Amino acid sequence: MIAEAGHFALILGLVIAFVQGTFPLFGASRNNYGLMALATSSAHAQFFAVSLSFLCLMYSFLISDFSVVNVALNSHTLKPLIYKITGVWGSHEGSMLLWVTILALFGIAVAIFGNNLPDTLKARVLAIQGLIGSAFIGFILLTSNPFNRLDPAPAQGNGLNPILQDPGLAFHPPFLYLGYVGFSVAFAFAVAALIEGRVDPPWARWVRPWTLAAWCSLTIGIALGSWWAYYELGWGGWWFWDPVENASFIPWLLGTALLHSAIVVEKRDALQSWTIFLAILTFSSALLGTFLVRSGILTSVHAFATDPERGIFILLLFVLITGGSLFLYAMRGPVLKGGGLFSPISREGALVLNNLLLTTSAAVVLLGTLYPLLLDAVGGGKVSVGPPFFNATFVPLMVPVLLCCTIAGMMTWKRADLHGVLQRLRVVALTAVIVTLVVTWLQGTKEILPAMALGVAAWLIIGSTVQIAERIGLFKISLMGSLKRASGMPRAAWGMAIAHGALGIFVIGVTASSAWKIEMIQLMKPGEIILVDDYKITFLGTANIKGPNYSGIQGQFEVNVGGDVITMLKPEKRRYQAERSETTEAAILTTLKGDLYGVLGEESGTGAWSTRFYFNPLVSWIWAGALLMAIGGLISLTDRRLRVGAPKLASKPISHAAK
Amino acid sequence: MPRNKVSFISLLPLGCLFALSILLGFYLWQLGSGQKSLEELPSALIDKPVPTFNLPPIVGEGVGLSEKDLGGRVSLVNVWASWCLPCRVEHKVLMKIADTGVPIFGINYKDTPEAAARFLKNLGNPFRAVGADRTGQTAIDWGVYGYPETFVVNKSGRIKYRHVGPLTEDDLNNQILPLIRRLQ
């Protein structure tokens, strides 16, 4: 009964989304306010219908209603409550339903927070969202209905893939989708602007918060995924250039470029056409990612169901949405001309360079992901592109991006004095060089690259700090005066400095954990001792354990530093009965200087166990950096000029130029 | 509304999109109609002699590998890399095969000598001999597209079977070992 209600609510959602996608568009072109107002009310109604449908599916999971195919295939009565809830999006059908629910959520958010938008723009933005919504709800209803019944109902379900029964991965999809789908708002704004033929600074000011929010979510989503890969896959790696990882990384790179180019539209009334193009590309890459992951066209460590029919359907949606918007762009793009001129050496110039490098790197990642596939399609045979390709192409593109971050932050708009900027950066550059030299000296000259990477990290972190110090006049005026300036400094400037500094923290984590990792793999009998870095690890033995829906073996390792027992590491091997599969649970001791990471392997038959221990220096800085980047984005989101109901400042632009 | 002439440049993205979509759609159709499969070896290589190759060893590890080492007895050829996560997953299965006495030869794909040597030292070395394919050319000749991949080569040096992805215990017991027994 509840499942049917959910199915019906979804059909209702489709009808409402279609109404939202058509009448307001017509109304906007005829200046019919009644039809335009339909956009807001139908965005509300669509959200209620779709989220009701989502809750119905969740309810079916909670009560373990195995007469619903999706629940029977993906749930089990013994599964802990939290994974009954997250199991809703553990399957293809459920995750697509989550996708449209989040889309409807963004729809209602634009309807509520967009009160200061011009009527036609608001109607058109919501209409585009409605069209995307109807396309994807239609896709679910036609090919992936999560409410299909099973008769007779089995007594027990198949359970959820144990690898998904994990807090890190449970919340990875919602954040990822908040990012993917969030970019649909920027996309809808771009298409609406193309229809209206007008892109101005207020437009950019409306687009930016949505892009920022989506970008923050995507950053957190990707970080969660990589953190999960780190502790769950049991090899201590955190990024594998896996096609599915790449599918989420490409929108992130393009979204980052979009964030930066939207600033130029807002502050300097330039780069309109490019920004529109980027908004289209960003959302399109999210759609392409959905297609690649959902069609099963990629082979990957992430195993998803292969179903060519679904693939064709999503491909068709991708072509319609991207093709339609690019066609509109080809027709109307040339109309969008900006007024703001600038010299190449200026903040705009630096942001253009940032955009070129970020989009190029997105293209490189896309090429590496699709090339094997396309070559095979035209009969060119099967090839593989592995991490060596990405390391050789992506890293060199990122180095100038990182170097420019700090310089751009110090430049002025329109025309900057490069010489002056470099002079102000003398201290920063000197620190970076000293860091590089000291690290090289400590390491010996064998490996110069890690030392240089740490130099770049210092450049970013010290650069951001100096930037803030300069703006608040630290040590130049009184401390109270500095604090006053600090609190008066625009949040966007804080956000920028924090996010750029966070990038430096991220670089440190990546460098240290890959260059100075210690790996020990051995057979151990109870009582044996190994040394990893400063840690003395004693194998005490194993114990049998039993969880709610699994049983397993736990290894017990005592960790000693300088004669004191500091902790016990208890890595596990779990066997999930219902799903008949095994997982390894690494035991991790996280400290400031790095992670001690232990994995229990197989028993050799002679009482000895294969064990693996890693010391990953500063590895948690990777996720700390990513999280801090997202926090920087959120701080920027609270900037006065973006706040809901803030007085319109279009007539008197606030000066944010770094002076 | 001002009407501008549509320039070639602004149509370019649209063209790229359509080219990409047609290729993707075509590929999807090939997968759907069974003409191509993500799992199978293109039939061209089955029953053919192994491609000619001559690979140097991983620095400091043995003598390398060429097609002359294969044949004369049933053997396995495994393509692996230290950076490849599934390769590590299947490693214990390879060690088991090595214990049965069936010779396994390794092609080490696009790896650094240090990392590859460390991998073998830490996890154990199931290979009779390993050739280092630094450029990836040999892997292409073998038609390898995913890592790891394992080939079964018969006594006369012809490829009889190809397995894409990590070998599991199930694959070993139900596919590989029965096939090897049959070929012997």
Image (spheres, helix red, strand yellow):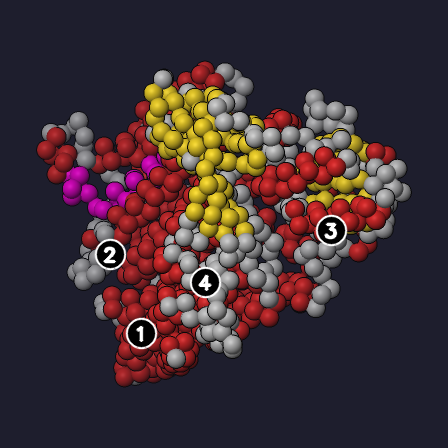
Q: Which residue is mark 4?
A: A75
> For residue A642, which numbered disc appears in the image?
2
Other residues around mark 1 within 10 Å, as few (<14) / some (14–19) / many (≥20): some
Q: Is residue A155 magenta?
A: no
Would residue A507 be found to the left or right of residue A396 on screen? left
**Of tags 2 and 4, which is closer to the observer?**
4
Query: Disc 1: which chain?
Result: A
Q: Earlier in the sequence, mark 2 or mark 4?
A: 4
**Of tags 1 and 4, which is closer to the observer?**
4
Dot 3: what SS?
helix
- Residue type highlighted by circle 1: Phe
Give the percent coordinates (x, y) of residue B114.
62, 26
Q: Main SS of the magenta segment?
A: helix
Classify the position of the N terminus of chain A by image quarter: bottom left
Residue positioned 48% across, 44% down in the render: A552
Give the percent coordinates (x, y) of residue A525.
53, 27
- Per the model, the C-alpha gap separating discs 1 and 2 is 27 Å
